[in-house]
């Protein structure tokens, strides 16, 4: 499999387990990435703030600072894609990860092959987002592709790149019901499974963040048995 790696593609991996960290570094460097390793949360946050990275892999159970806390603090300043890695794979743990701003959540143990697929999917999305499409107006909501975020009345929603891509897709198809299968394929870039709640979590996060900045021009509504729609109509 060929990953979307160039010599300038930089990945920060924050993992305290020495064996896994070694495997991650060897695998990612073998794929052609410029890899920086960190072994505790505080150092990982410092590196993520001080340097440019195209993607961050981060464990949750870290010394120094919990991975979820690191992610929350990072999201105050950076919108770099983040994949969480954790032995805590239950649904409440995944929901907590997405709520803090994760773009993906990979339960341990995982194969390096699966990790590669997920990295490739995220880098493909980022490459698409950087094609220089103009900001899209949606009533009083302004889309800023360069920041992967939306602004309303001077307030930023602080979306993750996945949440931004999801909302942008809904905006392009306003008043059109989009199926979960379509959204998984075109936004998450993987097949739909009825047991996969990732999309629902991302939709919930977008709703919450739009409400937090006072935006009510359009709403993300669930359409039972069909999917979701961005609509200005009253329910």
Image (cartoon, rainbow, N blue to C red):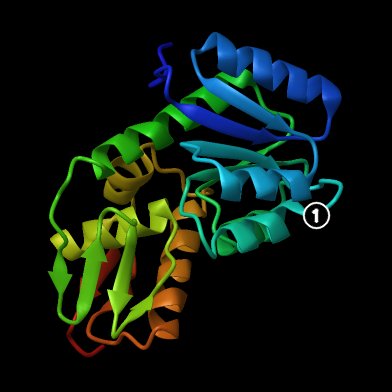
Location of residue 130 in the rendering, given as x and y in whole percent from the top left corner: 25, 42
Picture quadrant where residue 232 is located: bottom left
**Which residue: 84% across, 30% down?**
17
Location of residue 25 in the rendering, given as x and y in whole percent from the top left corner: 67, 19
How many numbered marks are there?
1
Q: Quadrant of the C terminus?
A: bottom left
Location of residue 97 in the rendering, given as x and y in whole percent from the top left corner: 63, 56
Furthest residue toward front:
50
Location of residue 116 in the rendering, given as x and y in whole percent from the top left corner: 52, 23
Q: Is 124 left, or right, of 217 in this rendering?
A: right
Per the image, label 1 sits on a secondary structure element best described as loop
Q: Which of the two residues, 222 or 75, is positioned nearer the viewer here? A: 75
Picture quadrant where residue 12 is located: top right
Q: Quadrant of the N terminus?
A: top left
Does the image show residue 175?
no
**Which residue: 32% across, 47% down?**
187
Q: Residues within 10 Å of mark 1 (few under 14, many from 20)?
A: some
Q: Is residue 70 above or below residue 223?
A: above
Mark 1 sits on what residue? 65
**Which residue: 57% across, 39% down?**
56
Does the image show residue 81?
yes
**Which residue: 81% across, 47% down?**
61
Q: Is 208 left, or right, of 135 in this rendering?
A: right
């Amino acid at each position: 499999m060929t990953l979307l790696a160039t010599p300038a593609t930089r990945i920060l991996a924050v993992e305290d387990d020495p064996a896994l960290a070694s495997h991650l570094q060897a695998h990612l460097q073998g794929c052609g990435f410029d890899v920086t390793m960190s072994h505790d949360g505080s150092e990982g946050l410092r590196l993520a703030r001080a340097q440019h990275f195209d993607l961050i892999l981060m464990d949750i159970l870290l010394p120094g600072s919990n991975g979820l806390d690191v992610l929350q603090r990072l999201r105050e300043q950076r919108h770099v894609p983040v994949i969480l890695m954790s032995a805590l794979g239950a649904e409440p743990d995944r929901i907590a990860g997405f709520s803090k701003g994760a773009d993906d959540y990979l339960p341990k143990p995982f194969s390096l092959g699966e990790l590669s697929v997920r990295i490739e999917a995220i880098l493909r999305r980022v490459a698409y987002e950087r094609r220089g499409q103009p900001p899209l107006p949606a009533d009083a909501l302004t889309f800023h592709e360069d920041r992967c975020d939306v602004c309303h009345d001077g307030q930023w929603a602080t979306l993750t790149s996945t949440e931004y891509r999801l909302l942008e897709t809904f905006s392009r198809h306003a008043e059109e019901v989009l199926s979960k299968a379509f959204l998984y394929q075109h936004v998450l870039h993987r097949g739909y499974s009825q047991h996969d709640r990732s999309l629902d979590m991302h939709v919930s996060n977008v709703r919450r963040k739009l409400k937090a900045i006072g935006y009510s021009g359009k709403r993300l509504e669930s359409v039972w048995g069909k999917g979701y729609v961005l609509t200005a109509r009253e329910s």
